[in-house]
Image: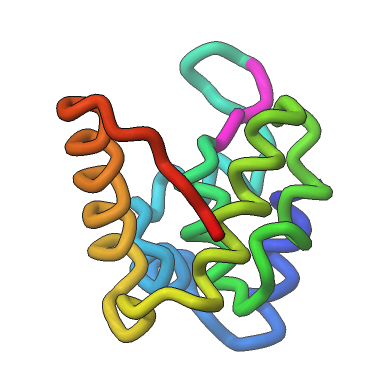
């Protein structure tokens, strides 16, 4: 379970919930909910987004694809998105930016491509 991975990592590294959440760029209450595996708003298991899984993977110091194996709610298309992101991350000229800034740049580029009708091409 995703929550067990987060909790074990935090314990191994001696990180508080707040310190780990800050490292990931997430709220401590959301990380707590992920650790517990229960969303009190709807009584179900949390369904973290791709962006959240990528932020968690960075905070856990693992590849996003390793973490997605524990995210059963992802569709195959979402899993492919994470794989594509992981590949691009290795070749990313923005790798020295914090993860949240990198994600903002990526979203901006996607919006501009959409706005101007430019399809993404990869070599």
Residue 12, position in %: x, y?
71, 85
Magenta segment's dominant SS is loop
Foreground residue, 61 or 44?
61
Tell me: 52 left or right of 37. left
Q: Quadrant of the C terminus?
A: bottom right
* Magenta-tinted stretch: 44-48
Seen in the picture, residue 89 relative to 45 is either above or below; the reply is: below
Residue occupying image coordinates x 30% and y 39%: 110
Residue 1, position in %: x, y?
82, 47
Residue 95 part of the magenta segment: no
Residue occupying image coordinates x 30% and y 64%: 102
**Residue at the top extreme of this rendering:** 42
Tell me: 78 left or right of 30. right
Foreground residue, 50 or 22?
50
Foreground residue, 118 or 51?
118
- Give the quadrant of residue 97: bottom left
Seen in the picture, residue 120 relative to 40 is either above or below; the reply is: below
Residue occupying image coordinates x 55% and y 77%: 90
Residue 50, position in %: x, y?
53, 41
């Amino acid at each position: 379970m995703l929550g067990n991975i987060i909790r074990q990592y935090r314990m191994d590294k001696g990180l508080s919930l707040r310190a780990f959440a800050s490292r990931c760029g997430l709220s401590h209450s959301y990380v707590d909910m992920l650790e517990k595996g229960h969303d009190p708003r709807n009584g179900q298991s949390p369904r973290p987004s791709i962006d959240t899984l990528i932020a968690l993977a960075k905070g856990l110091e693992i590849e996003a694809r390793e973490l997605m194996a524990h995210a059963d709610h992802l569709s195959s298309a979402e899993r492919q998105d994470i794989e594509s992101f992981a590949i691009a991350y290795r070749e990313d000229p923005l790798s020295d930016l914090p993860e949240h800034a990198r994600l903002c740049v990526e979203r901006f580029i996607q919006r501009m491509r959409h706005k101007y009708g430019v399809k993404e091409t990869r070599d």
